[in-house]
Amino acid sequence: MGRDGIVAIPLERLTRFYLMNHFLLHRTKKQNVVDVAGVVCGLHSQLPLTPYYSLWNRIEAFKPELLEEAVYRAKSLVKTWFMRGTLHIIPSKDLPTYHHALKRMWFEHHGRYMNKPGWPNREIRQRLIYPKIVEALSKEPLRRKDLNDRVRVLLGDVAQPYDRLFSGWGGILKETSYLGLTVHAEPCGKEACFARLDQWLPNIDLTEADETQARNELLQKYLRCYGPASAQDFACWSGLLTSEATTAINNCATALTQVKIEEVGKPLWMLKKDMKTLLNLDMKEQAPLCLLPKYDSYLLGHKDRTRIIDNKHLQQVYRPVVGEVAAVLLINGRTAAMWTHKKTKNTLTITINPLQKLPKQTLTELKPAAEDLGQFMGVEQTIVHISD
């Protein structure tokens, strides 16, 4: 306990707590992808395979069809744009919370590029284009190109200025998702397909939540998995402004408490009900190696990433110039190496690029972990290379 009454904990304990909350200290034996996606506040899905590898790391004997069943048939999970304007998969029942918490974030901050000169303004889009998108999707989900073609027909002579709105990086379909009009449907081959939200998830009501309540709920979901964390961390993860994140923390103050990280000294917020678990963690238990994919949610939860990586390695893993977050090898919850892979019909070759000297025990544990991944990817042989 510090002089200010705030509990001080070692960084190692913080990392262990974070690893546990992400199902990476112990894989869950329950094959419930909905629960896992809910606890980690969404599976990052900018790359099609990331959510599969993320779940493989967290669920024992995970099979890809479990995710596909939940997203495309049971529809207990939904895929669309959420935090920071990026694609995630979340539980469908949580959609109202995410929608109301993040809608204004998109239109006032991350989505301002839609208002650049020469593009139709939001009033024109709302009056003219959104209704045509809804009409075009009334019979079935469509690929982006097919939706664009159908909207062009419905717009008739005025269609030409609006072609760029259907660009591959999101465009107006990202905007309609934040309005609660569209979501991702089952892909058409390798191409994304889009559906009307009211038809894809007819039992989801987006009218009964307000922004303040939704942001408070989202903060507490976030702290359940990513806490202890600061207002800056919550803002960086969600895409909200730091002032908006601070307001949510103040609103939820009675449910929260603060701790200090001994090596950092900055107070962080967490749920009061999680304090006992944090303080009683078994620090002697051996944590498993984790081969996390690019953009795994574990890597994107905080502005201050001290709990998972040494500052001197940040620019090797987080590459803002190319917009990439590398796939990494975790040892005791911290980033020890990056990895890439090449898959042929029968062979998976994994190349490990260490950020530090790897312990002999790690080298011993790496082969069975890689072979487990190879089995998941359906190959007969897995080869591991360690770069110099």
Image (cartoon, grey):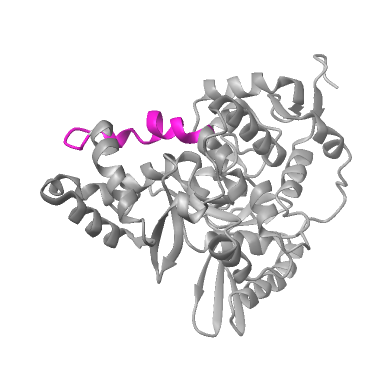
Characterize the magenta stretch by its predominant secondary structure.
helix
Name the quarter where the N terminus is drawn: top right
Q: Eyeballing the image, is 356 above or below 129? A: below
Residue 112 rendering spot, x and y as whole percentages: 33, 33
Which residue corresponds to the image point at 60% horizontal and 77% vertical from the top-left? 383
- Locate residue 115 relative to residue 111 in the image: left or right: left
Seen in the picture, residue 221 relative to 72 is either above or below; the reply is: above
Residue occupying the point 54% across, 53% down = 78
Residue 352 percent location from the top left of the image: 58, 64
Q: Is residue 132 magenta?
A: no
What residue sits 59% from the left and 20% below the top? Answer: 247
Q: Residue furthest top?
A: 4
Please tell me which residue lies in front, 295 or 94. 94
- What segment carries the magenta color? 101-120
Question: Where residue 358 sits in the image (x, y, percent)?
Answer: 68, 59
Decide which of 379, 113 is in the foreground and name it: 113
Could you say which quadrant of the image residue 174 lies in? top left
